[in-house]
Structures are given as C-alpha cells and as structure tokens.
Image (cartoon, rainbow, N blue to C red):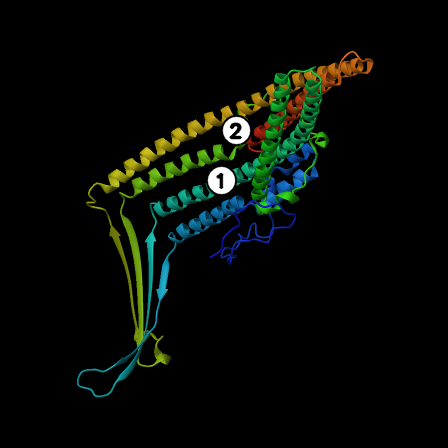
C-alpha cells in the first residue's frame, strides 16, 4: 500500500514522493495520438499572450499536458468513442464458429470412432426500420458531447491556472508591502516607547501602537499562509507534487503588463461557441432520437439466421459438401403483450426530452448571464481601478508634501512614518485591483468559450 505525504514541510529539495505506477491500457485515438495541438486550440493559447508573460504561458502549456482532470476528460472521450463502435457493431451481422473433436462409441460396437465437427452460425437483425441506426446516432451525440465536456474542462483548468498564478503574484506584492507596513509600525511603536518614557505620549497611545503592530504581524502571517496554500493548489493544477511549491517561478506584479481593451459590448450570439451551450443542443437532439427509437420498439423485428455444420470421421474431409449440414431461416417477431413497458418507455423518453429541452433553455439564459456578468465586472473594475489610481496619486502627493514639511522641521518623524503607512496601504489596494482587472479578463475569456475579443467594438 502506498501513501502520499501529508506533512507540511519546508525544504529546498524536489519531491521524490510519487504514487504507485500502473500500466496504461488505453491507446490514443489514431486521429490524435501523434499530436496534442487540438488541446492547445481548446485553450486559445494566442489569447494568453496578452499578459506578455512567458512564465504564465509555460504554466498553461504544462497544465494542458499534465493536469490529471484533463487527462481524465480526454480518456472519457475515448470511452464514449468505444461506445459508438460497440453500438455500431449491432448494426452488422455477427458470425461465430467453433470446433468439436469427439470420440464416439456406438451401441452394439466395441470399437470407438473419432469425429470432427465444425459448427458455424451467422445472425443478423434486418434493420429495415433503422432502429439500430438511430441508436448509433444517439450514442454518437453522447460522444460529441463528451468532446465538448473535454473542451470545457480545458478552458476551466486554463482559467484556474491563470487566476491562481495572478493571485500568487498579488500576494507576493501584498506581502512585500505588508512587511514594510510592519516595519513602519515597529518604528512607530519604538518612537512611542521613547516618547512615553519622556512623558510626551500617553500609555494608552503606546498600547494602541503596540496593538497595531501585532495586528500587522498577524496579517502578514495570514498572507503568507494564503500564498503557501495557493502555491500548493497551483502545483496540483500543473500535475506536480505540492512539495514543489518552492520551485514555482513567477514574475513580479510591477513587471506584468496586460494590454487588452475591454470590449464595449458583446453580442449574445457569442454563447453559441460555448461548449456547454453546444452540448445542450446536442443533448436535445439526442433526446429526440431516443423518442424515435422508443416509438420503433413497437414495430416488429426481422431476424435472419444461418447455420452450417461440418462433421466427418477424419479432419481431412470435414469441409466437404457431403459432410455439411446447412440451413438458412428468417423470422419476424412483434411485441404482443409487454405489460405496458413499451408505452411507459415511450412516455419516459418524451418526459426526458422535455426536461432536456428545459435544460437547454436554462443553459441559454445562464450563458448570457455569465457573459454579461463578466463584461460588467471587467468594465466597472476598470473604472474602479482608474479611481483608485487617482487616489494613489493624491496619496503620493500628500506624502511628498509631508516629507517636505518634515525636512523643514514642522512635523515629527512619527507623523511622517504614519503618512508613509497610508501610502503603503493604498499601494496594497492598487495591487489588489490591478489583479482583479486581469482576473476579470480571464472570467470573460471563460464565459465566452475562450474567445472573448472576437467582437471588440
């Protein structure tokens, strides 16, 4: 029995822990076994170039190739593909053949004889009403739906990788600023202790400064915990062990340059490229075929059976016409009494069709809602970011003004440090909202099926 490590450890060594390896029993489909290009087409790699970050692109590519959810999604497609082949086989004749050597002792004889028999049988259901053909079409719809599920999984994982990566970068910047805030509060507390001893600052104010310092240190620990957990999640998304979190490289938020305008509007037709929308359409078509099949269950079935038996005392003369018994027969069978099961099945399929149809209508509305929500979030967060940048510029001007006053000796160093903390706090807000705008872009990418900017106005 194998166990994965569960202890949180800090080290600089690459993880050597790995689950037990099993032999794969699935071969890739001939159409895709030599190429993974279709997977990269699913996630629209060109769109990720808008972040101008080679590291992010490399992580998206790594997740596309190594993420286990995506591997399972691709294997699920193979399962449905084999189901199609299995159902199609039922449209074809089936043939069986066997061999039966035997020793025989006939009544009234003392000697034994050897006999060789070779039976062969062919059966075929004449699909004159195309019932089996419709069943194959229904299974093909499921196969096509599984490919859309696969595409949706790739878009979802790529979005998760991008969002997690950006949030890690945001935490890097936030931790850097929080460390400066803690240092500032430490300086404020140290100055207040000195002033308290000199009788210039009350004990209450000194305690208040100490509480602010402790709170800042607590916030810093919480931020580091969040970053560590995100790094673990990021490793799993890449198909790696969480123990490799320390080796995750990333750019700094200051160097991240996202340059793509938010579209002023997106037509509702864009939902037709979403995998969930297309899949919902396929499921309505599949449910309609199921109803047609249920109706054809009331019709008779026509079966053709061919039988041949070769039997001889020696193997050399088995396949001769004088030792052959052959028959060909056909039959027609119609359901006479089934206890109402066929009627119930038809009603069931009709009810299923109605449910799937309502799900299609709901998918349509939800898809439009998600696109609108993503577009509104992108627009308003961009406007909010613009206001926050103005606020940050005002805070910088205020700090420079107070720095000038400090140099003139009109304010104390304690006051200047407090103004500097105000500047650091607004810088944290800028970092948070900058990443929010980029995450909004990923949300729009996901909501529109990985192609959000085909309709930029």
Circle 1/circle 2 CB separation < 8 Å: no
- Residue located beneath label 1 in the image: 149
In which quadrant of the rendered image does the C terminus lie? Answer: top right
Report the front residue among 244 and 56.
244
Q: Please, is residue 164 above or below residue 10 in the view?
A: above
- Disc 1 secondary structure class: helix
Residue 452, placed above or below residue 201: below
**Residue located 29% across and 51% down the image:** 302
Q: Secondary structure at mark 2?
A: helix
Residue furthest to the top in view is: 410
Which label sits on residue 271? 2
Q: Is residue 239 visible?
A: no
Q: Say which residue appears at 43% left-offset and 27% top-offset.
A: 362
| Residue placed most toward the observer, 151 or 220 | 220
Q: Quadrant of residue 345?
A: top left
In the picture as drawn, the residue positioned furthest to the bottom comes out as: 110
Question: Which of 190/353 is in front?
Answer: 190
């Amino acid at each position: 029995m194998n166990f994965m490590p569960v202890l949180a450890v800090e080290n600089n060594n690459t993880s050597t822990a790995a689950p037990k390896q099993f032999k794969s029993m699935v071969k890739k489909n001939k159409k895709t076994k030599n190429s993974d290009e279709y997977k990269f087409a699913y996630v629209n790699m060109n769109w990720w170039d808008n972040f101008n970050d080679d590291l992010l692109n490399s992580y998206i590519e790594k997740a596309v190739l190594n993420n286990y959810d995506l591997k399972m999604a691709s294997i699920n497609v193979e399962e449905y593909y084999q189901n199609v082949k299995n159902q199609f086989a039922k449209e074809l004749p089936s043939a069986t053949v066997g061999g039966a050597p035997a020793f025989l002792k006939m009544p009234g004889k003392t000697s034994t004889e050897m006999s060789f028999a070779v039976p062969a049988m062919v059966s075929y259901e004449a699909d004159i009403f195309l019932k089996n053909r419709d069943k194959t079409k229904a299974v093909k719809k499921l196969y096509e739906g599984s490919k859309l599920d696969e595409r949706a999984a790739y878009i979802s994982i790529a979005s998760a990788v991008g969002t997690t990566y950006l949030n890690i970068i945001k935490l890097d910047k936030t931790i850097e600023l929080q460390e400066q805030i803690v240092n500032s509060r430490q300086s404020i507390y140290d100055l207040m202790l000195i002033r308290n001893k000199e009788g210039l600052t009350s004990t209450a104010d000194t305690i208040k400064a100490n509480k602010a310092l402790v709170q800042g240190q607590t916030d810093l620990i919480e931020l580091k915990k969040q970053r560590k957990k995100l790094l673990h999640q990021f490793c799993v998304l890449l198909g790696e062990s969480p123990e490799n979190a320390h080796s995750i490289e990333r750019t700094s938020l200051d160097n991240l340059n996202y340059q793509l305008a938010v579209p002023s509007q997106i037509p509702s037709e864009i939902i037709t490229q979403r995998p969930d929308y297309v899949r919902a359409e396929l499921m309505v078509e599949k449910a309609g075929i199921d109803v047609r099949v249920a109706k054809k269950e009331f019709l008779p079935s026509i079966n053709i059976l061919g039988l041949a038996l070769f039997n001889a005392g020696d193997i050399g003369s088995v396949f001769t016409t004088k030792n052959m018994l052959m028959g060909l027969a056909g039959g027609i069978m119609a359901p006479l009494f089934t206890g109402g099961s066929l009627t119930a099945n038809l009603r069931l399929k009709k009810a299923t069709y109605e449910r799937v149809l309502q799900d299609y209508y709901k998918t349509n509305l939800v898809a439009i809602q998600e696109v609108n929500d993503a577009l509104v979030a992108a627009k308003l967060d961009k406007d909010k970011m613009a206001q926050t940048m103005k606020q940050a510029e005002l805070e910088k001007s205020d700090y420079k003004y107070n720095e000038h006053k400090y140099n003139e000796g009109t304010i104390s160093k304690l006051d200047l440090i407090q103004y500097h903390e105000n500047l650091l706090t607004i810088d944290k807000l800028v970092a948070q909202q900058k990443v929010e705008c980029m995450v909004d872009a990923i949300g729009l990418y996901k909501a529109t099926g990985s192609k959000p900017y085909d309709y930029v106005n």
